[in-house]
C-alpha cells in the first residue's frame, strides 16, 4: 500500500506528533530529554524550521512548527531521528526501532487554531496527570510562553507576540489564556486531523 503523501506548505504551521514504538518510552532520563532538545534545535536550524511550541512526554513528542520549505519538516525529523535514535540505543544498550513509524502531522489554520494547538500541546502533562499545572513540567514550551524562560530553539509566533506590548504583558496574557478550558470539539478535530494527516 502506497504511503499517503504529507501535506506541508512553506510558511504554514504544522502540528507534529511522534510516538515511541508500541507506546514504549523514548525518554528514560533527564539527559535523554536534553539530548533530544539539543538535536531538535540543531536540525530545525539546518532545515529552516521555526519551533513555536513543544512538549516531550515520556513516550511521545508534540511540536508546533513552521517550515520555510515544503519538505523542511520531513528533513528535520529524519535528521533528528538519526541522531537521537543512535544516541538512545547506545546509551541504553538497545537495538532496533525507537519510533512508531513515521511522524504524524496536520496543517494548522493559523488564525483559527494556532493558539488552540499551542495550548493543547503545553497542557499535555496536566491532562496526563503528571503535574497539576503546566509550569511544573520542565520539558515544554510553557516555560517560554508562560514563564519567560530564554530557550534557544524557541521562535515565538506572531500571534503570541500580539498578546502584549512587553514580555511581561505577553506572559500574563498567555497565562490567562491557558487558564481557560479547551473546547472538547476543537480537541477532537485537532486529534483527528493530526492522525489522518489533514488540515485543521
Image (cartoon, rainbow, N blue to C red):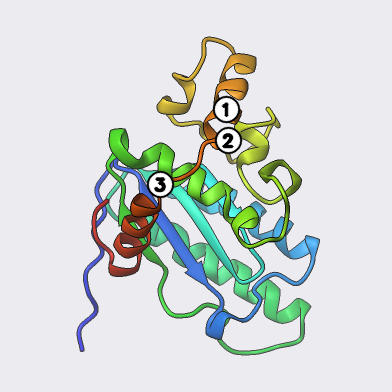
* 3D distance between C-alphas at marks 1 and 2: 5 Å
Secondary structure under tag 1 reads: helix
Mark nearer the N terminus (1 vs 3):
1
Q: Is residue 11 visible?
A: no
Residue found 64% across the figure and 53% down from its top: 126
Residue found 62% across the figure and 58% down from its top: 56
Left or right: residue 84 versus residue 155 is right
Query: Which residue is label 2 attached to?
Result: 179
Specify few, some or many for label 2: CA neighbours under 10 Å numbering under 14, 14-19, or 20 or more.
few
Residue found 41% across the figure and 25% down from its top: 158
Vertical placement of residue 54 versus 32, above or below: above
- Pointers 1 and 2 in contact (C-beta within 8 Å): yes
Query: Which residue is label 1 attached to?
Result: 176
- Pointers 1 and 3 in contact (C-beta within 8 Å): no
Which label was assigned to residue 146? none
Query: Which residue is label 3 attached to?
Result: 183
Q: Is residue 44 visible?
A: yes
Amino acid at each position: 500500500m502506497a504511503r499517503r503523501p504529507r501535506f506541508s506548505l512553506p510558511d504554514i504551521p504544522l502540528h507534529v506528533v511522534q510516538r515511541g514504538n508500541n507506546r514504549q518510552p523514548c525518554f528514560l532520563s533527564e539527559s535523554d530529554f536534553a539530548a533530544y532538545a539539543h538535536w531538535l534545535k540543531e536540525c530545525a536550524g539546518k532545515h529552516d524550521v521555526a519551533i513555536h511550541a513543544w512538549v516531550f512526554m515520556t513516550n511521545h513528542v508534540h511540536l508546533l512548527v513552521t517550515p520555510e520549505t515544503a519538505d523542511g519538516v520531513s528533513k528535520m525529523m529524519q535528521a533528528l531521528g538519526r541522531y537521537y535514535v543512535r544516541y538512545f540505543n547506545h546509551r541504553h544498550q538497545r537495538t532496533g526501532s525507537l519510533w512508531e513509524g513515521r511522524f504524524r502531522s496536520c496543517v494548522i489554520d493559523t488564525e483559527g487554531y494556532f493558539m488552540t494547538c499551542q495550548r493543547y500541546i503545553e497542557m499535555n502533562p496536566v491532562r496526563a496527570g503528571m503535574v497539576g499545572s503546566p509550569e511544573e513540567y520542565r520539558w515544554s514550551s510553557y516555560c517560554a510562553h508562560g514563564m519567560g524562560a530564554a530557550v534557544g530553539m524557541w521562535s515565538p509566533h506572531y500571534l503570541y507576540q500580539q498578546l502584549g506590548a512587553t514580555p511581561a504583558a505577553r506572559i500574563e496574557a498567555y497565562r490567562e489564556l491557558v487558564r481557560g478550558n479547551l473546547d472538547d470539539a476543537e480537541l477532537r478535530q485537532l486529534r483527528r486531523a493530526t492522525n489522518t494527516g489533514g488540515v485543521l
